[in-house]
Image: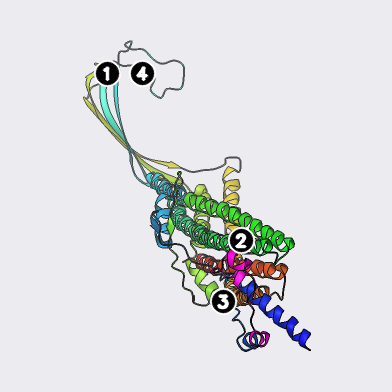
Amino acid sequence: MHNHRKTIGFGAVLAIAIACGVLPGCSLQAQNKALPDAPTVSLLSSAAQNPPDPVQAAGLPDQSMSAPPASPGSSAPRLTIAQAEQLALKNNPNISVAQLLALAQIQVTREVRSMELPTLTGSLTAVDANLNGRIAAGGLPNARILNRAAGGVMVDQLITDFGHTGNLVRSAQFNAKAQAESEKATELDITLVTDQAFYSALTAQAVLKVAQETVKQRESTDQQVKALTTAKIRSDLDLSFADVQLSQARLLLLNAQNNQQATMAALDDVLGSEKSAEYSLVDETNNNPEPAPDDPEAMVKVAFTQRPDLAALNERYMADEHYSKAERDLWMPSINALGAAGGEPVRSDTIQRSWYGVAGVNVNVPIFNGFLFNAEENQAKLQARAAQEQVRSMRDTIARDVRTAVLNAQTAYQRINVTEQMLNQANFALALASARYKLGLSGIVEISQSQLNATQAAIDNANARYAYQSAMAVVRYEIGQ
């Protein structure tokens, strides 16, 4: 019985020595001192009555992991997500392309409308001719050749072509409206890409902080295990595991640094910057975000009324409808008014008057042109029907995408709570593993696995937080906001 008590007492003293060896305030010199001669009973009773708190009295430093937000203290200019969206809409070349195409389509409308307006042509003519000569060959309208110097104007005004030009104008107007809606759709595209790039950069920034904290903690662990190994309290196997864990943490840090720089490069590209610009991203996300919408059918109805790309397809369908009517009206006659007037201050003796004027009406009636108008009309009708089917296909796609986006947002919202619980559990398990390792009740494998779980939980939590924000950005995009 006496031997048994002596053995237990020595084990308790050894546990206290190990605890002192791994606490940050204890030095290697203190570890190498002889164990104190203390009554075994008092040591046992002290350890039994006051068990170490797994969080505060863990043998290793506080290794609980978290997913911290972006660091506000930086010399780089601060950038919020609203500012990023404004910069992207201002500088991204795709926005300029959409705006220029919209302006170009407006000019097409003016081109077509010019057919309804009169054309006025001025002419100056001077001729030194062989008197009494005639043009004997060729297709010139006036065969007589006379000496003259004259100036005049000619006017040509369309009176009516029974709807052909009017439908062409309306078709061009609808195409202009469609291009304007496409410009809005491009703005939505750029806004969505900007939001996704911004949240990806925030995620990479948070993961980088987790990696830096992981390296810091595992360096401390490695140093302490190395001290215990030198003191012959732990084996070389423990040191090997600690070295491997430290190398893995450093590899994680390298990957996080690379990913952080890559996401910033992607953000610079969306912002329309050719140069690499460093920003201090401002994390405005709420730790308790609003839940995702729970009525996808209401979101679908909103999308049908607000999606600019759907509106653009509708406008193009209307443009094709009016164009098909214009092609049908090619069979209708066209009536033009013509006029010409001018003066001849220098003229031949055979020309009696010093001015001239003429007016008339020209009627063109198509009779046969090798079925050209029939083919053009049928082609336009088929294109209009195809445009109508594209609208229907887009509505189906929008309904599917909205429902999918809402479902993804709901799942992403649920992942936040799950990852937070997992992070808390991983931190608690790490604290327990640290306490067990300190007391000599477990090996390095258990605490290494706990560190790995805590790191992965912190990364998953950071991904979940910003993935939800990105998912909500997709929802806003899908409903056209």
The Cα–Cα distance between marks 3 and 4, rounded to whole angstroms, is 80 Å
The Cα–Cα distance between marks 2 and 3, rounded to whole angstroms, is 58 Å
Nearer to us: label 4 or label 2: 2
Residue sitting at x 46%, y 66%: 481
Nearer to us: label 2 or label 3: 2
The Cα–Cα distance between marks 4 and 2, rounded to whole angstroms, is 113 Å
Provide residue 392's location: percent of width, then percent of height.
59, 64
> Is 210 left or right of 342, judged from the image as shown?
right
Q: List the single residue furthest toward the top.
A: 130
Nearer to us: label 4 or label 1: 1
- Of residues 213 and 303, the one drawn nearer to the viewer in this rendering: 213
The amino acid sitting under disc 1 is Arg
The amino acid sitting under disc 4 is Arg
Does 342 sit above or below residue 79? Answer: above
Does 299 sit above or below residue 80? Answer: below
Provide residue 47's location: percent of width, then percent of height.
64, 84
> Is 401 left or right of 350, judged from the image as shown?
right
Nearer to us: label 1 or label 3: 3
> Is 240 left or right of 185, judged from the image as shown?
right
> Mark 2 or mark 1: which comes first in sequence?
1
Residue under label 2 = 223
Residue under label 3 = 297
Does 403 sit above or below residue 198? Answer: below
The Cα–Cα distance between marks 2 and 1, rounded to whole angstroms, is 110 Å
Provide residue 355's location: percent of width, then percent of height.
23, 28
Residue 426 appearing in the image: no
- Mark 2 Cα-neighbour bin, 10 Å: few <14, some 14–19, many ≥20: some
The Cα–Cα distance between marks 1 and 3, rounded to whole angstroms, is 80 Å
Provide residue 98's location: percent of width, then percent of height.
45, 50
Residue under label 1 = 148
Residue bounds of the magenta highlight: 20-44
Residue 340 appearing in the image: yes
